[in-house]
Image (cartoon, helix red, strand yellow):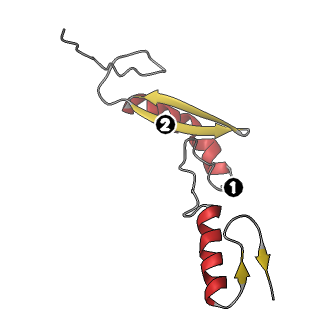
Amino acid sequence: MAKKVVTVYTDDLTGAEAEDVGTHTFSLDGVNYEIDLTGDSFDKLVEALGPFIDAGRKTGRTPRTGAAVKRPTSTPSQDSAKIREWAKENGFQVSERGRGFIIV
């Protein structure tokens, strides 16, 4: 069986289907919004907000949703193994497993 997937881009403001639809984000009172607009609709949004943007102050960027989360490069068990190895090399008695470090 053949399957064909068709993606239709639609302007959220006008409901018109178009190829040049882009997703735009903005924030108002701490709430983030996302809207899909054609170039003409986006120009209307910028024109409507223009006087408020010109009179306002920038306070920094709002964090984007879905941003990548920085993951640790090693796990605690990998760190423990490195610590145990270093301790043994430097003359410390160390248990093979668990939390036990014996300082003599």
* Residue with the mark numbered 2: 24
Left or right, 103 with reference to 26 = right
Task: Give the residue drawn at x 61%, y 43%.
Answer: 51
Rendered location of residue 104, percent (x, y): 81, 89
Q: Vertically, is 4 above or below 79?
A: above
Please name the amino acid that badge 2 sits on. Answer: His
Quadrant of the image for the N terminus?
top left
Report whether 81 appears left or right of 43.
right
Say which quarter of the image contains residue 15: top left
Marks 2/1: CA–CA distance: 19 Å
Residue 102 lies, in percent from the top left, at 79, 80
Q: Are marks 2 and 1 in contact (CB under 8 Å)?
A: no
Give the image location of residue 57, x and y in percent. 68, 54
Residue 60, position as x, y percentages in the image = 65, 56
**Residue at image x 49%, y 36%?**
24
How crowded is the residue under tag 2: few (<14 C-alpha within 10 Å), some, or many (20+)? few
The residue drawn where x is 62% and y is 53% is 61
Disc 1 element: loop
Asked if residue 11 is positioned above or below residue 28 in the image, the reply reads: above
Per the image, the residue denoted by label 1 is 59
Q: Residue 8 bears which disc, if any?
A: none
Taking depth in this image into account, of 17 and 94 the one nearest to the observer is: 94
In the displayed structure image, the side of residue 101 where residue 21 appears, left or right: left
- Report the amino acid beneath label 1: Thr
Decide which of 78, 103 is in the foreground and name it. Answer: 103
Question: Which of disc 1 and disc 2 is earlier in sequence?
Answer: 2
- Residue at 33% of width from left, 18% of height from top? 8
The answer to whether 97 is drawn above or below residue 19 in the figure is below
